[in-house]
Image (spheres, rainbow, N blue to C red):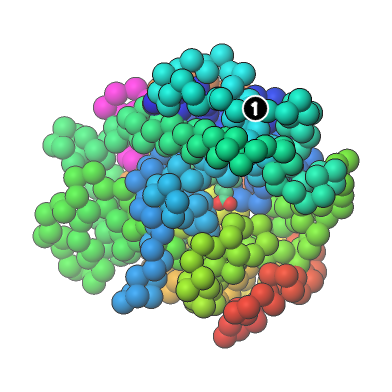
Amino acid sequence: METLGELMLYDKNISPNKNQACASCHLPYTGFSGPIPSVNLTMVAFPGTVHSRAGKRTAQRHPYSPFFPVLQYNQVQGLFFGGNFWDSRATGYKLRIPDAEQAQGPPVDTQEMGLPDTACVAFRLSQAVYRPLFEAVWGGGSFDIKFPHETEEICETPGGAAVFGGSTTPIPLSPEDRTRANTVYDHWAQSIDSYEQSVQVSAFSSKFDAFLHGGYTLTSDEMAGFMLFNGKGNCNSCHVDGRGTTLTSGQTDASTAALVNPLFTCFGSANEGVPLNPRNAFHYQTTPDSYGFTPNPYGFGYRDLGLGTFLRSGFGSNANPNISWRQFAPTVDGQVQVSSTRNVAMAPPQCPTTEAPGPYFQKGFFHNGYMKSLKQLVHFYNTRDKYAYPVTSGHCPAGTTEKVDCWPMPEVPNNIDMTTGNLGLTDQEENQIVVFLQTLTDGFTRPYPNIDTFTGTCMMGGSAASQGNELLIPTPPLPPCASAICDAAPVPGPKPIP
Ligand code: HEC
Ligand code: HEC
């Protein structure tokens, strides 16, 4: 099943133009996040099967995603835990595994692989060279489906095209065949989950894993970073590393490891107050494309409310399957998933770091790719509130440098996490946390599979603190948040979204 999943992940036939696979946006050398440095540096979202379309967020790393539980609301804490995607919209409610449900998103996402009907996946799989393997795993009758003659033509046309008149099931199938096609789609998802959960992808083979097992001694900087991650940095309260938290200065961690395979996430969500990124390609897709489809009619009126928009079954998300959750939307607006920090620093062997002066590989961090280096990301947690200015990106006051001593205002001002933002870390302490994050890269105890496929060139020069700043653009005057997003009940509050 694992091998089947791997074949599927690289199969470009699962898109109308046979030009896009999962692997177009997730490759091993970046820890399965966005593989193209110029995209990470500028438009953030990756082009889909229709190249003028692109999503709205950074491609998340998918190792360790299979370990997220089914989304649940914890009534005592008033918090949501689990799910996949930045906004947790792959809940796992049906397949009982969020990661498998996640794999059912991209093939029919208009901005991604873009098939017009989920049954196109069964149709294309029935023609795949690895069909015998699929049948060996899931049963010989899997493809006993009578596809009408127009199926190929339908599946060649990207989803959202005006010719479909809004239908998401344009292939006319009998109810029995529709059910069979749905079953194939569930099995597609489970096979992909199997591969993502395997040690090929979720390897637990980092320096830190070796350290936990007693097979590696952290250097003094790595150890100092680890102590700051658990202590003054407060990172461990969300990116759980299985140790105690030693927030009070002078406290020492006397706890023993409660977890020996920590995932560096609490599975929860938070709003870290990240500024709106005016480079995000989604803001510019405001007119109909050649298929008559307009990805984002709201332009810069779009706001990413993350989990809040999902709970409202809102624009750009999925239908929330649990109506009793909807009331909590205003308490989670702006929240996105607490990523695992594992593999955040993974980069191709020839450009082995994400940090200038390099030679480095350019990544984009956080849900909208606003951060261009881990140094910036840690500096943000450290000084977000110290250098806060009521401006949008590209408009920091003269005499200040954006991301160094000026942080623009958050995109979503509600529900901001206040446990970080003014940590009092020194420059050296920030660097030590970055060094610690680098110990979480798989491939230390044994090679990470297919890590060496990057054929581009590395970047050189500059400083990690201002990495990418030469490509900042001024945010245009922002129109108010579109009513489809911010007037959907229950409306955001207590503050309105600007
Ligand atoms: C066009 C680029 C693109 C393609 C193609 C694509 N992804 Fe993604 N992937 C993304 C983006 C962007 C996100 C975050 C989207 C969001 O949260 O709204 C993401 C998120 C994910 C996640 C969630 C990780 C987590 O921890 O929550 C997984 C898993 C994943 N993708 C796997 C896949 C698989 C499997 C496929 C193929 C079936 C695929 N992706 C195809 C861009 C892509
Ligand atoms: C209150 C919970 C919380 C705390 C505390 C916290 N984080 Fe995070 N972390 C998050 C959330 C939420 C995200 C995703 C934010 C986004 O994309 O807007 C994240 C994302 C990250 C990422 C991954 C970014 C990516 O693109 O995948 C890294 C690395 C990270 N945090 C490091 C740290 C470090 C280092 C600290 C301590 C200085 C820290 N975090 C403290 C919640 C937290």
Residue 83 in the image: state x and y as whole percent: 44, 55
Along the line of sight, which residue is nearer the eye, 304 or 124?
A: 124
Residue 366 in the image: state x and y as whole percent: 53, 53
Along the line of sight, which residue is nearer the eye, 61 or 129?
A: 129
**Number of marks:** 1
Residue 384 in the image: state x and y as whole percent: 51, 68
In this view, the residue farthest toward the bottom is 494
Looking at the rendering, which quadrant does residue 177 occupy?
Answer: top right
- Under circle 1, the secondary element is loop
Along the line of sight, which residue is nearer the eye, 317 or 25?
A: 317
Residue density around tag 1, few if under 14, some if 14–19, many if 20 or more, within 10 Å: few
Q: Is residue 67 above or below residue 486?
A: above
The verdict on residue 28 being magenta is no
The verdict on residue 440 being magenta is yes
Q: Is residue 398 visible?
A: no
Circle 1 is placed at which residue position? 146
Span highlighted in magenta in the image: 438-448
Q: Relative to residue 331, is residue 391 drawn left or right?
A: right
Examine the residues drawn in magenta and state their main secondary structure.
Answer: loop
- Quadrant location, ligand no. 2: bottom left
Residue 416 in the image: state x and y as whole percent: 49, 73
Quarter the N terminus occupies: top left
Residue type marked 1 = Lys
Residue depicted at 67% across the width and 37% down the height: 173
Q: Relative to residue 174, is residue 8 drawn left or right?
A: left
Q: Is residue 328 visible?
A: yes
